């Protein structure tokens, strides 16, 4: 093995050690030829990156080696994936070409390397360059649609970058962490790579909100021993009973990761002690025969019910209905002897391996003789369809990302056709989504559905286990308002095509009527004039224009006002027709209107998260717009940073006491006369703060008060919270940060 002399002797030794570690953790099938090819790829990468250093000062080659080790050891992939991981930055950062890679390692390797190679500003100009991150992500997904290994290498690359993010400047940390939490962590989840997903989530929280990460981590340390002992006591009688039945099991006390715990605390407005599923009891059954797995899982569940009461509302049966990524388990919640609810997961060894290793285990356990498509096959088919629709409709990269997240990142539900066939849909899907999922014609003519034998309108949201019978009418036609009833981009695409086809029927009638309007206005019936009329009425195509003319929604007066007069009066008509046709994305229109304006001075405090002085904030500067100030954890901020990472700017609070910021508190208290008076006294008399609003709602014997006040900074708000907590009737006070 020969390494370039640009590496020191110590670095050469370290590179060889890391390469040997890679070979050691490579557990999948390999022969001498496989090892030889991987060695060749290692030497090529080491030479290509010989002069490059990471920000930490280490040789850059440590990075592709680490990525390859993740691919081999943590994802269980083989030769081709390992070679691609070693070479993934060679084309992007050095003079080696894809043709060279293809010649030495094959076309498949070259395609995967090309798929993970970032786009640069040179690849685009104008508007596309502003969404370079989005364009790069679209390229990755399009490449992934023909080879899943593209996204696996990208995930391994991102995981190692997140592990070494501490050496990057703060604004880069926010950019990379936001992009990760918005896009790459959800993809890892959908592929069943839970270990990768969990680590990415924790690393993102560590950089986006370090104070929260450290606080939750500290609280977990304080309760860990007590909670684990409690789980062991909970599992002991069940394990003993199963042993007497001849069912071999192993048990585990699982601690949820920091970001998952924080997510639950925020979602339910609870302290860590109040969240019942921070620790999970997992029981794993030794069941060599796959056909016996369901029976063994339910027998184990039955033993639990012998000792503990279950909460049937929180039951989740992923054994009968595995997730599309192959995940299977029975999730059940039981009341233990101490009066606490315990989250319990029941699964077999095979299920556990799939749950932990996702995609790699999927290949290991796949039935090669079966003609049925697996959940992952079906998911990849949806990805390919989404890519095809994006190509056909020429959508922007940002629209593509939104569609991808809408269809493929949401949790899923299972519903049934009248014949009992199972249909998988994203959570939030409606009757109309279901109809379009079956067939475009069914969606275009849908008037409602029988859900579990009950008549329901097309906008009804479906729930897990619903049986849906679509009702159609030959007189029903697709309508624009239906876009508001759809949750999936595939259904929206089919609706869009349905409306286009429907409107084509009116083309000749509308064209004839429009020609008369133009003749009466003494305006040339040219393509340019028709395009101008459509554009100023905010209609996407001339066919849309003909349709609205035929429907008498565009009149002679409209033509006269827009084309006959060349003044600015057409803008009044633009407002009138804003809802007609297929409108271009608002972000596109905004950029087009402000292209030549340059930067707009000033800033805006975001109302989606209402940061106040003392909060950690991030500032985002988009072209032609005021700087936006957000909480780093704000979903809207993370969305913007994941798409426009280059627009993150340094920001710090510099406001005096003359400035006031709106903050909202949620107060839970015993319902007793006098609470409102005490709150008013503390806020207005003692703290001398202006109150914007107070809303009080009685819930049983408790009252929930939502109070909005103007404060100068975080310290003022914290003092107010401390005083309110001292009121005898008050049980809990928390700050409410609105989510985008």
Image (tube, grey):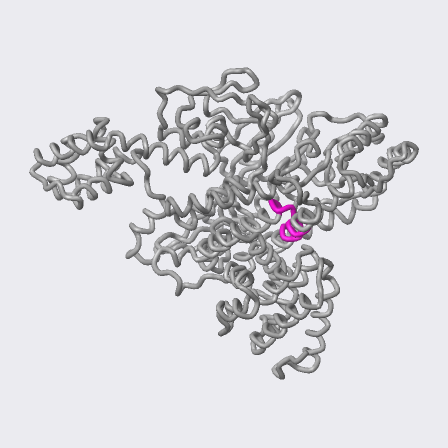
Q: Residue furthest bottom?
A: 5
Residue drawn at 68 percent across, 63 percent down: 69
What secondary structure prevails in the magenta region?
A: helix
Check the image and report above or below for 158 versus 682: below
Residue 374: quadrant of the picture: top right
Q: Nearer the viewer, residue 327 or 562?
A: 327
Residue 199 included in the magenta stretch of the image: yes
Q: Nearer the viewer, residue 192 or 372?
A: 372
Residue drawn at 55 percent across, 21 percent down: 418
Residue drawn at 43 percent across, 28 percent down: 443
Q: Quadrant of the N terminus?
A: bottom right
Check the image and report above or below for 598 versus 384: below
Check the image and report above or below for 117 versus 550: below
Q: Nearer the viewer, residue 76 or 582?
A: 76
- The number of numbered badges drawn on the structure is 0
- Which residues fall within the magenta stretch? 189-202
Residue 644 included in the magenta stretch of the image: no
Q: Nearer the viewer, residue 341 or 538?
A: 538
Q: Position of residue 699 (x, y in %)?
A: 62, 22
Query: Left or right of 438: which side holds 105?
Result: right
Query: Left or right of 443: which side holds 159?
Result: right
Q: Is residue 216 visible?
A: no
Q: Position of residue 582 (x, y in %)?
A: 32, 38
């Amino acid at each position: 093995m020969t390494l370039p002399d640009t590496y020191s002797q110590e670095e050469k030794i370290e590179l060889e050690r890391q390469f040997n570690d890679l070979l050691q953790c490579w557990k999948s099938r390999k022969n001498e030829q496989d090892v030889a090819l991987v060695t060749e790829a290692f030497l090529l990468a080491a030479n290509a990156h010989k002069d490059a250093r990471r920000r930490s000062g280490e040789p850059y080659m440590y990075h592709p080696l680490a990525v390859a080790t993740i691919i081999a050891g943590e994802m269980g992939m083989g030769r081709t994936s390992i070679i691609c991981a070693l070479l993934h930055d060679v084309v992007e950062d050095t003079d080696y070409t894809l043709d060279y890679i293809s010649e030495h390692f094959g076309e498949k390797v070259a395609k995967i390397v090309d798929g993970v190679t970032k786009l640069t500003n040179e690849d685009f100009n104008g508007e596309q360059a502003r969404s370079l991150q989005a364009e790069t992500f679209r390229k990755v997904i399009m490449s992934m649609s023909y080879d899943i290994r593209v996204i696996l290498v990208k995930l391994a690359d991102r995981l190692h970058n997140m592990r070494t993010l501490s050496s990057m400047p703060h604004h880069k940390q926010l950019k990379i962490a936001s992009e990760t939490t918005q896009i790459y962590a959800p993809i890892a989840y959908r592929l069943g790579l839970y270990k990768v997903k969990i680590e990415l989530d924790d690393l993102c929280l560590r950089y986006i909100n370090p104070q929260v990460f450290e606080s939750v981590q500290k609280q977990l340390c304080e309760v860990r021993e007590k909670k684990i002992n409690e789980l062991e006591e909970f599992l002991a009688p069940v394990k003993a009973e199963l042993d007497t039945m001849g069912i071999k099991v192993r048990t585990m006390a699982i601690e949820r990761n920091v970001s998952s715990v924080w997510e639950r605390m925020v979602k339910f407005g609870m302290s860590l002690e109040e969240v019942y599923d921070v620790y999970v009891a997992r029981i794993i059954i030794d069941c060599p025969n796959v056909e016996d797995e369901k029976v063994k899982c339910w027998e184990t569940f039955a033993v639990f019910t012998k000792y503990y009461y279950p909460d049937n509302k929180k039951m989740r049966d992923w054994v009968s209905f595995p997730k599309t990524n192959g995940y299977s388990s029975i999730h059940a919640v039981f009341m233990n002897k101490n009066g606490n609810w315990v989250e319990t997961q029941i699964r077999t060894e095979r299920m556990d391996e799939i749950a932990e290793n996702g995609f790699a285990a999927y290949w290991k356990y796949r039935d090669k003789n079966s003609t049925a498509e697996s959940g992952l096959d079906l998911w990849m088919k949806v990805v390919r369809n989404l890519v095809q629709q994006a190509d056909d409709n020429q959508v922007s990269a940002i629209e593509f990302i939104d569609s991808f997240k809408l269809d493929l990142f949401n949790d899923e539900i299972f519903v049934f056709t009248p014949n009992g066939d199972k249909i998988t849909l994203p959570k939030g899907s409606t009757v109309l989504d279901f109809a379009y999922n079956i067939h475009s014609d069914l969606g275009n003519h849908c008037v409602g559905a029988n859900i579990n034998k009950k008549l329901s309108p097309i906008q009804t949201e479906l729930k897990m286990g619903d049986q849906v019978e679509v009702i159609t009418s030959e007189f029903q036609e697709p309508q624009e308002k239906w876009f508001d009833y759809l949750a999936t981009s595939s259904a929206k695409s089919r609706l869009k095509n349905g409306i286009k086809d429907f409107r084509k029927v009116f083309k000749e009638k509308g064209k004839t009527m429009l020609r008369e309007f133009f003749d009466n206005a003494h305006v040339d019936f040219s393509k340019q004039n028709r395009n101008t009329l459509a554009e100023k009425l905010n209609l996407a195509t001339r066919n849309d224009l003909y349709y609205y003319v035929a429907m008498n929604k565009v009149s002679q007066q409209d033509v006269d006002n827009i084309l006959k007069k060349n003044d600015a009066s057409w803008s009044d008509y633009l407002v009138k027709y804003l809802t007609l046709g297929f409108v271009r994305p608002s972000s596109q229109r905004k950029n087009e209107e402000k292209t030549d304006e340059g930067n707009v001075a000033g800033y805006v405090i975001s109302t989606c998260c209402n940061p106040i002085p003392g909060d950690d904030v991030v500032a985002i500067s988009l072209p032609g717009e005021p700087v936006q100030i957000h909480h780093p954890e704000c979903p809207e901020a993370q969305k913007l940073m994941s798409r426009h990472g280059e627009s993150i700017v340094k920001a710090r609070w510099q406001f005096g006491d003359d400035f006031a910021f709106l903050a909202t508190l949620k107060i839970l208290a015993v319902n007793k006369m006098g609470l409102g008076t005490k709150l008013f006294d503390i806020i207005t008399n003692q703290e001398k703060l202006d109150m914007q609003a107070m809303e009080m709602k009685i819930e049983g014997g408790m009252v929930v008060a939502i109070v909005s006040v103007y404060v100068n900074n975080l310290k003022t708000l914290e003092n107010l919270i401390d005083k309110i907590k001292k009121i005898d009737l008050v049980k809990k006070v928390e700050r409410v940060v609105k989510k985008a």
